Image (cartoon, grey):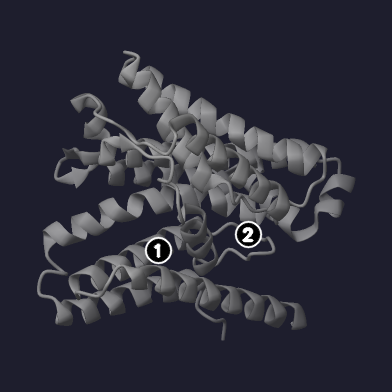
Amino acid sequence: MNRLPQPFWVGASAIALSLFFSRISPHFLTGENIVTILDQSSINIVVAVGMTLVIASAGIDLSVGANVAVCGIVMASLIKAGFGVLPTIAAALLTGALLGLLNALLVVKLEVNPFMATLAMMSLVGGGALIVTQGIPIYGFSADFSWIGRGKVGGLPVSALICTAVVATGGFLARCTRLGIYAAALGGNEEALRRNGAATRLYKTVLYVVCGMCAALASVILTSKLNSAEPLAGTMVEMNAIATVVLGGTKIRGGAPRIVGTLFAGILMGVVKNGLVLAGISSYYQQFVTGFIILAAMVISERSKKNGSKK
């Protein structure tokens, strides 16, 4: 009998934890709080969709948190200079794409290990954000911009609707396009793909650019939600995204991208964080729980890979 896929267990865990937290707090399963969980989960899920495609190709991007911070600063600067909402968002997406391209150049052109390349970019870009702002947040934006992170359409947060669109697009790319198919092939056997004539460098580059743009879009949501651009806004973003991707069933060493699993895992992470808050548990424990989830996901990923190789 085939085992049930990991996304199934992640979804079941989210439901089980929801029932558990509802026993602790009567406010947990209210419609208002469910909407809050979707809203709070949206930023992590948007980043994780891009990260899913990169990890599926046996890469990684540790610079997404710094990307989020820099894109926020770019948007804040443009808004303060009098630019409209749409040009500001376009500039953020372009910035995210350029940072993704820089990562790709290091990994593809200079052949630097993805972990070390993006770790260096995380430090460089994050440090640049602190230097430019001197560590001081930029705040006070227009109501039109703040609506992106705080507004609702039909009772649903705009952030959740953006997240839904990103997940749908990511799922389409993963299943129905050459980019998604090649992402899995790159993670499985890059040399074989290259010998078949595929432009592996080009597809790797596009994957990092897409990941950078997802980080930029998450920055749009976060900056508008906070009504502030902070140089440390992206702290722990990369760790949460990696945990979400691996927990969702995408193997850390590459393989098929599991976008649905990433969605379920992102909701699970949101349920845990929201439940801990309603249970009156200190926010300090959230990082501890996230670390535990990452460790558990890594162990599950490695064991499933070894079991698969034995068959």
Q: Position of residue 304 (x, y in %)?
A: 63, 78
Task: Tell me if label 1 and label 2 are in contact, CB under 8 Å.
Answer: no
**Residue sitting at 29 percent across and 43 percent down?**
159
What quarter of the picture does the N terminus occupy? bottom right
Taking 65 as reference, is 144 above or below it? above
- Give the farthest residue toward the right: 195
Residue 256 disc label: 2
Q: Position of residue 230 (x, y in %)?
A: 38, 40
Task: Name the side, left or right, on which 87 lies relative to 241.
Answer: left
Q: CA distance from mark 1 to mark 2?
A: 16 Å
For the residue carrying disc 2, how many other residues have a C-alpha within 10 Å: few (<14), some (14-19), or many (20+)? many
Disc 1, SS = helix
**Residue sitting at 46 percent across and 23 percent down?**
91
Taking 142 as reference, is 257 above or below it? below
Amino acid tagged 2: Ala
| Residue placed under numbered mark 1 in the picture | 264
Q: Nearer the viewer, residue 232 or 271?
A: 232
Q: Nearer the viewer, residue 118 or 284?
A: 284
